[in-house]
Image (spheres, rainbow, N blue to C red):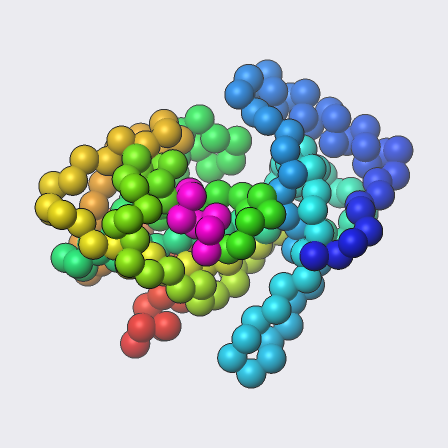
């Protein structure tokens, strides 16, 4: 993490506040906490290093909505592809969100709020599914994805889970509706037939390359 903070011009600050006020009228539950911004990244042999900066969520949201703020930091989040013992993954339809509402997305996904990547994706999984962390047998960050439409980055992670039964109930936070277990060999057909968050499409492609 960079030690120095983010400085905005008066014009950029005004753009951030305008976007934030508009977003709050659409979703009164929005909270302006600290999230992580991507500054740069580099690949050293098998290790990916990401230089980061803590930023306010409302700044990240303004960037996601297309505001030109004149800063290098871009929103950085985490996105996971769950794989259970039956070769299934989790797919949900986004609701109560600021972007891509109604689109399909691999579950879990969320902002990186200063925690370690593995800790954050575990937390997102538990919050969005209602399942306990004890079902997660392994977490592997394996790719970095750029959403070119919003200029936002996500660290892609594979989550191995072992469930007691194949019919375990998913009861999450309400961020998604209709969360379903989907066979991995059926995922291509589903993503082709429905609107899907670009990061999830890229994550699925990266996963296939990673495991081939």
In this image, 47 relative to 183: left or right?
Answer: right
Q: Quadrant of the N terminus?
A: bottom right
In this image, 190 relative to 80: left or right?
Answer: left
Judging depth in this view, the residue of 61 and 141 nearest the camera is 141
Classify residue 184 by image quadrant.
bottom left
- Residue at (28%, 48%) from the top-left corner? 134
Extreme bottom residue here?
45
Q: Position of residue 77 (x, y in %)?
A: 54, 49
Magenta stretch in the rendered image? 118-124
**123 inside magenta stretch:** yes
In this image, 8 relative to 141: left or right?
Answer: right
Judging depth in this view, the residue of 207 and 163 nearest the camera is 163
Q: Quadrant of the C terminus?
A: bottom left
So how many labels did they put on this image?
Answer: 0
Q: Is residue 172 visible?
A: yes
**178 inside magenta stretch:** no
- Residue at (17%, 58%) from the top-left corner? 85
Q: Position of residue 115 (x, y in %)?
A: 55, 49
Judging depth in this view, the residue of 205 and 139 nearest the camera is 139
- Residue at (18%, 49%) from the top-left corner? 163
Q: Position of residue 96 (x, y in %)?
A: 44, 26
Q: Position of residue 53 (x, y in %)?
A: 71, 52
- With respect to residue 89, does 46 lie above or below? below
- Residue at (69%, 28%) from the top-left corner? 19
Q: Is residue 149 visible?
A: no
Q: Main secondary structure of the magenta part?
A: helix
Extreme front residue here?
134
- With respect to residue 153, does 11 lie above or below? above
């Amino acid at each position: 993490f960079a030690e120095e903070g983010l400085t905005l011009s008066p014009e950029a600050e005004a753009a951030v506040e305008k976007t934030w006020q508009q977003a709050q009228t659409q979703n009164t539950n929005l909270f302006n906490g600290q999230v992580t911004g991507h500054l740069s990244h580099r690949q050293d042999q098998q290790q990916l290093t990401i230089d980061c900066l803590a930023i306010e969520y409302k700044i990240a949201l303004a960037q996601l909505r297309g505001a030109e703020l004149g800063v290098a930091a871009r929103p950085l989040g985490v996105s996971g592809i769950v794989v259970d013992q039956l070769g299934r993954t989790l797919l949900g339809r986004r609701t109560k969100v600021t972007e891509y509402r109604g689109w399909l997305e691999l579950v879990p996904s969320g902002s990186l709020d200063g925690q370690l990547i593995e800790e954050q994706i575990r937390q997102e999984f538990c919050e969005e599914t209602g399942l306990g962390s004890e079902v997660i047998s392994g977490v592997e960050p394996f790719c970095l994805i750029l959403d070119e439409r919003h200029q936002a980055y996500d660290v892609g992670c594979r989550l191995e889970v072992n469930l007691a039964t194949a019919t375990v109930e998913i009861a999450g936070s309400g961020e998604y509706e209709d969360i379903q277990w989907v066979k991995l060999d059926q995922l291509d057909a589903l993503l082709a037939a429905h609107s899907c968050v670009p990061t999830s499409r890229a994550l699925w492609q990266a996963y296939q390359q990673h495991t081939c």
